[in-house]
Amino acid sequence: MIKISDQANICINEQLYIKPDYLNHKYISGNKYRKLKYNLELAKRLDVKVLLTFGGAFSNHIAAVAAAGKTFGFKTIGIIRGEELEAKAVLNPTLNFAKSHGMNLHFISRTAYRLKTSEEYMVNLRRIYGDFYLLPEGGTNDLAIKGCTEILTKEDEIFDYICCPVGTGGTISGIIASSFSHQKVLGFPALKEGFLDKEIRTFTSKDNWKIIRDYHFGGYAKIDAELIHFINAFKDLYDVALDPVYNGKMLFGIKDMMAKGKLKKNAKILAIHTGGLQGIEGMNTVLNKKGLPLII
């Protein structure tokens, strides 16, 4: 159902390369495409017509599911964290995008959102919406990880380090599964919380990976002038756009670790660019209100 074309790795310097996985689709880009691939195929086989999922105000996952629904003929429902967002949705580029692609947005309180995985809440959702195919927040499940095992190719065997941003742990789990024995997989989390190691271990028994917790900039969607300057300078130098939530933090971390000698000398490094560029517009509205520089 979904075909993904491999893009050539981008050479930043003699050590660092970027795999531009975000170029695999205009709207359902990067790891979101990978995570949805086998889930959408299963939903089609089951003849389920509706996809339901969860996310926040600027969720890449919400935008990707909405676009996938329109592209492949599913109705989509997005359960959005924060009922106060309903009145402001028209000003939110991510939610506007999702709505324009046919997603039915349902806003709930943050308290109710924390109950989203409970059986009682799920029964209530099915009572309201009928039959649907459930995609978890962030899209991570066994089928999503299966899709992410396809990010690395045989040609990537030359690299010593494989680096990727980490949200819910699905993408890095797939990469770990398909990594070669001599490779070290480094995950750069967007979140401050420390649950990721346990989560990743539920999906892999391999131990050639490590979570690098020094570059989250204070937590999910937290950003400062230093990171903005780095992202803008990176685009100016290499013509590669970075989002501020995931890939910007990862590349900042890689470059800092290289400068400080924290990676093996002369090692070849591959950074997986997972997409998320749709979130830049929304982040810029926040930065503008704070009087910070904008992401170009």
Image (tube, grey):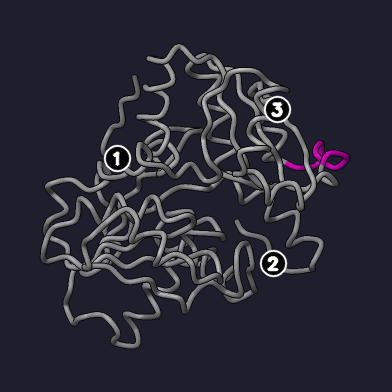
Residue at 35 percent across and 48 percent down: it is 20
Which residue in the structure is indicated by mark 1?
146
Element marked by disc 1 = helix
Q: Amino acid at mark 3?
A: Lys
Outermost residue toward the bottom in this view = 260
Disc 3 secondary structure class: helix
Where's residue 116, x and y in %? 65, 43
Image height check: is 112 above or below 44?
below
Q: Earlier in the sequence, mark 3 or mark 1?
A: 3
Q: Which residue is the site of mark 2?
A: 293
Q: Amino acid at mark 2?
A: Pro
- Label 3 belongs to which residue? 99
In the displayed structure, does residue 154 sit left or right of residue 19?
Answer: left
Which of marks 3 and 2 precedes in the sequence?
A: 3
- In this view, the mark in front (3 or 1): 1
Query: Residue 49: image x %, image y %?
Result: 54, 14
Q: Which residues are magenta?
A: 86-92
